[in-house]
Image (cartoon, rainbow, N blue to C red):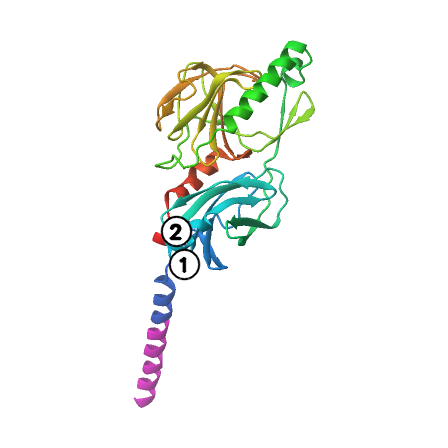
């Protein structure tokens, strides 16, 4: 009998030990996407620096926030002048006892470790390490009229030259403060007919990668603003057709191309969801659709990914 009790005791001990192990396994908090997408932080030279996402891809925005460990009255004169990342400058704005801004990884950037530098007025230079990971967006071949693929007519070349001047003025007029009050929203919910970043060959000739996403849209479908902002361009261009560009502050712009009609003017302030025009087939196209783009300080980023990444702009990481 004593042997039987001994065996039973061992079985009970194993049962409780197994239950304890299962309890530890099943009640451990599993990593969530929110945790994965949260800010990564480092401390350097008296500053706490945050960025998200942790490992961006080419064609993706990087939200950056930082604060000094010293009281703000002592460091107000040390406001950062700018950020520099992969040979491009990006803006910062004061926010909640610190600063925030948005950088971007250009298409074609090789997977490697990079340094995002931030300079402050007292001469301090911060170096934030960021690892860019590879992503292949694929290739697309299109056929368009030859004069649209490679313009040769003098009047068209003059038009393109004027268009570039107008674009330069528009992109140079961004506000110093972020205008977003909520996450960016896509202007349409239809099928994507051409995704972001694909290497393009027009009539067999290599051209710039696709700098936005194309939504399926019949002529006349209403197009809405993706976020609050100020219209900085609303006119017809050679390649883009009828185009609206909206500034959202900090050198963040959204673009709406190939419109049939434009229902806003430069200088207008627009709200999220406000109709700014209708879909069409103007400019260099193969059919009616909406081309929607996001450009940050001269760098095109994936608009659909920025819809998700824009949530980081609504947070102050040290207050979470």
Observer able to see residue 213: no
Query: What is the x, y in percent for residue 238?
Result: 57, 16
Magenta span dominant secondary structure = helix
Q: Quadrant of residue 272?
A: top left
Mark 1 or mark 2, earlier in chain: 1
The residue that label 2 is drawn on is 317
Query: What is the x, y in percent for residue 100?
Result: 43, 45
Q: Residue at x 38, y 35 (%)?
A: 180
Q: Residue at x 37, y 53 (%)?
A: 73
Label 2 neighbourhood size at 10 Å, few (<14), some (14-19), many (20+)? some
Residue 74 belongs to magenta span: no
Q: Give the vertical position of 256 relative to 137 (above or below).
A: above
Front residue of 89/236: it is: 89
Instruction: Answer with left or right where residue 301 lies relative to residue 34.
Output: right
Q: Residue at x 40, y 58 (%)?
A: 70
Front residue of 308/39: it is: 39
Residue 9 belongs to magenta span: yes
Q: Give the vertical position of 101 relative to 151 (above or below).
A: below
Magenta segment: 1-18
The residue that label 1 is drawn on is 70
Determine the CA span between mark 1 and mark 2.
17 Å
Label 1 neighbourhood size at 10 Å, few (<14), some (14-19), many (20+)? few
Q: Which mark is residue 144?
A: none
Which image quarter holds the N terminus?
bottom left
Classify mark 1: helix, strand or loop.
Answer: loop
Observer able to see residue 316: yes
Q: Give the vertical position of 9 relative to 164 (above or below).
A: below
Query: What is the x, y in percent for residue 99?
Result: 42, 47
């Amino acid at each position: 009998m004593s042997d039987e009790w001994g065996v039973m005791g061992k079985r009970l001990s194993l049962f409780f030990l197994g239950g304890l192990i299962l309890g530890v396994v099943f009640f451990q908090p599993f990593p969530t996407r929110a945790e994965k997408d949260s800010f990564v932080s480092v401390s350097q030279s008296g500053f706490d620096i945050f960025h998200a996402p942790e490992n961006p891809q080419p064609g993706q925005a990087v939200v950056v926030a930082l604060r000094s460990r010293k009281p703000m009255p002592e460091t107000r004169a040390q406001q950062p002048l700018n950020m520099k990342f992969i040979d491009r400058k990006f803006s910062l704005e004061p926010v909640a006892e610190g600063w925030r801004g948005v950088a971007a990884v250009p298409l074609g950037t090789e997977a490697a470790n990079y340094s995002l530098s931030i300079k402050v007025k007292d001469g301090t230079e911060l170096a934030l390490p960021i690892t860019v990971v590879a992503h292949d967006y694929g290739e697309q071949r299109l056929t368009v009229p030859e004069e649209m693929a490679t313009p040769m007519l003098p009047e068209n070349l003059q038009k393109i030259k004027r268009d570039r001047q107008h674009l330069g003025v528009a992109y140079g007029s961004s506000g110093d403060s972020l205008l977003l009050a909520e996450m960016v929203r896509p202007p349409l919910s239809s099928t994507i007919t051409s995704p972001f970043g694909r290497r393009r060959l027009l009539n067999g000739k290599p051209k710039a990668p696709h700098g936005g996403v194309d939504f399926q849209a019949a002529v006349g479908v209403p197009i809405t603003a993706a976020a609050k902002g100020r219209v900085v361009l609303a006119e017809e261009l050679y390649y883009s057709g009828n185009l609206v560009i909206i500034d959202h502050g900090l050198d963040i712009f959204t673009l709406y191309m190939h419109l049939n009609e434009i229902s806003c003017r430069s200088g207008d302030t627009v709200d999220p969801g406000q109709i700014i025009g209708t879909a069409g087939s103007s400019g260099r196209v193969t059919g009616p659709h909406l081309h929607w783009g996001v450009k940050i300080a001269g760098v095109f980023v994936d608009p659909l990914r920025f819809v998700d990444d824009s949530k980081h702009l609504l947070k102050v990481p040290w207050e979470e």
